[in-house]
Image (cartoon, rainbow, N blue to C red):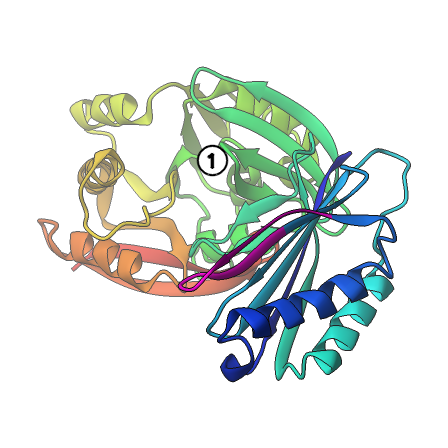
């Protein structure tokens, strides 16, 4: 059950919406067509302004609300809102919407029109998330599989009809059963040789990276993850991507340490411990106009400590953000260029199904 919001917009000749009388005629045509779908439609309120055009609120039985706005510049918008209870049929089918758009487009002599299928608001299952550059993405989520709040974040696992189970942390998609390409691109499968190597994973609580790395026969992997609850949830509901690696916290092949990765990195540095690979599987690059703030400070701390842990020929591998976030990616690369000793980097990219966009990955070594 959720509120349904249907949006229509039409571009009209501005010379036909410039006066109050012209806008009233457009409103009359719109109402006449709406009444074919909502036969008991009534006008609740209307307003006319020389500067802002025409605005009206109509309703049917005070349940369905229709707002209509006609701008003097030639833009017409119509919003239809109603509450749809579980098991009930929508008031407007896709055929109804398409037919209304085509008829109004013809009657109003509109040269451009658009309708959007219902935006579902207020439902318990949130099917909308955003891309890295803040575009709205609608998912085919049908079930909330798991939900909890740890001391660090909100944890959800949702089921998508096409993506499988998805891990969502603080309302942001992290990984889904469909996302092997993410893990393989991060680790450079087929390019990097992990056999006999010492590896450190920062984060990685979903277990997917650890699971795939162990297939490459490394000498040992240590994973530093702060959130025990994430690992418990993924072990139960995402074991298709993590196998059984989250069942145990220590084996001959790997150790999972639950705690603040920065504190353990400091400990490893003090002990003189070195790794062939360090993976940064932590927060995404922030979307910001300048490299300031807590998130950027954290990234710089991770850089500083990671390169103190690397062997001279070691590699730091991490994910960045969507390839459309050019400004933030440039800021990230600027931070890499400021590191001392100097480093060099290459990038790879892959389309990640659950992100519904192309993602950039970094491979960083000493220069």
Q: What stretch is highlighted in magenta?
A: 43-56
In the image: residue 337, left or right of residue 18: left
The N terminus sits in image quarter:
top right
Q: Assess whether residue 79 is covered by the magenta stretch.
A: no
Residue at the spot 44% in from the left edge and 15% down from the top edge: 151
Q: Which residue lies furthest to the top in this view?
A: 151
Task: Tell me the element at label 1.
Answer: loop
The C terminus sits in image quarter:
bottom left
In the image: residue 304, left or right of residue 96: left
Q: Where is residue 327 in the image (x, y as percent from the top left)?
A: 27, 61
Q: Nearer the viewer, residue 146 or 38?
A: 38
Quarter location, residue 206: top right
Q: In this view, does 4 lie above or below 169?
A: below
Q: Name the residue under label 1.
A: 204
In the image: residue 126, left or right of residue 346: right
Residue at the spot 50% in from the left edge and 67% down from the top edge: 71
Q: Is residue 255 above or below residue 367?
A: above
Residue at the spot 27% in from the left edge and 37% down from the top edge: 295
| Residue 68 appears in the rendering | yes
Magenta-drawn stretch, dominant element (helix, strand or loop): strand
Callout 1: few (<14), some (14-19), or many (20+) C-alpha neighbours within 10 Å? many
Quarter location, residue 353: bottom right
Q: Assess whether residue 50 is covered by the magenta stretch.
A: yes
């Amino acid at each position: 059950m959720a509120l349904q919001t249907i949006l229509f917009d039409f571009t009209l000749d501005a010379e036909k919406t410039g006066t109050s009388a012209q806008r009233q005629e457009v409103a009359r045509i719109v109402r006449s067509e709406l009444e074919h779908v909502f036969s008991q439609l009534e006008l609740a309120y209307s307003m006319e302004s020389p500067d802002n055009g025409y605005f009206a609120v109509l309703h049917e039985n005070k349940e369905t609300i229709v707002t209509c706005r006609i701008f003097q510049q030639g833009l017409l918008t119509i919003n239809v809102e109603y509450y749809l209870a579980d098991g009930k049929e929508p008031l407007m089918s896709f055929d109804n919407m398409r037919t209304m758009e085509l008829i109004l487009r013809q009657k109003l002599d509109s040269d451009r029109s658009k309708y959007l299928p219902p935006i579902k608001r207020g439902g318990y299952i949130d099917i909308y998330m955003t891309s890295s550059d803040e575009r709205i993405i609608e998912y085919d989520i049908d079930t909330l599989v798991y939900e909890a709040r740890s001391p660090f974040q909100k944890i959800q696992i949702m089921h998508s009809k096409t993506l499988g189970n998805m891990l969502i942390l603080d309302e942001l998609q992290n990984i889904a059963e469909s996302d092997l390409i993410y893990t393989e691109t991060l680790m450079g499968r087929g390019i990097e040789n992990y056999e006999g190597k010492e590896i450190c994973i920062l984060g990685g609580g979903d277990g997917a990276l650890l699971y795939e790395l162990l297939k490459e026969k490394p000498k040992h992997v240590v994973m530093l993850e702060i959130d025990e609850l994430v690992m418990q949830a993924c072990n139960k509901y995402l074991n298709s991507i993590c196998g059984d690696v989250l069942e145990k916290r220590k084996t001959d092949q790997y150790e999972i340490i639950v705690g603040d990765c920065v504190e353990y990195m400091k400990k490893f540095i003090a002990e003189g411990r070195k790794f062939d690979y360090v993976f940064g599987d932590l927060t995404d690059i922030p979307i910001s106009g300048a490299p300031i703030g807590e998130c950027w400070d954290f990234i710089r701390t991770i850089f500083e400590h990671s390169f103190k842990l690397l062997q001279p020929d070691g590699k730091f591998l991490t994910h960045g953000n969507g390839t459309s976030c050019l400004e933030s990616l440039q800021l990230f690369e600027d931070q890499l260029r400021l590191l001392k000793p100097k480093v060099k980097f290459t990038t790879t990219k892959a389309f990640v199904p659950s992100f519904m966009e192309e993602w950039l990955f970094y491979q960083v070594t000493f220069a």
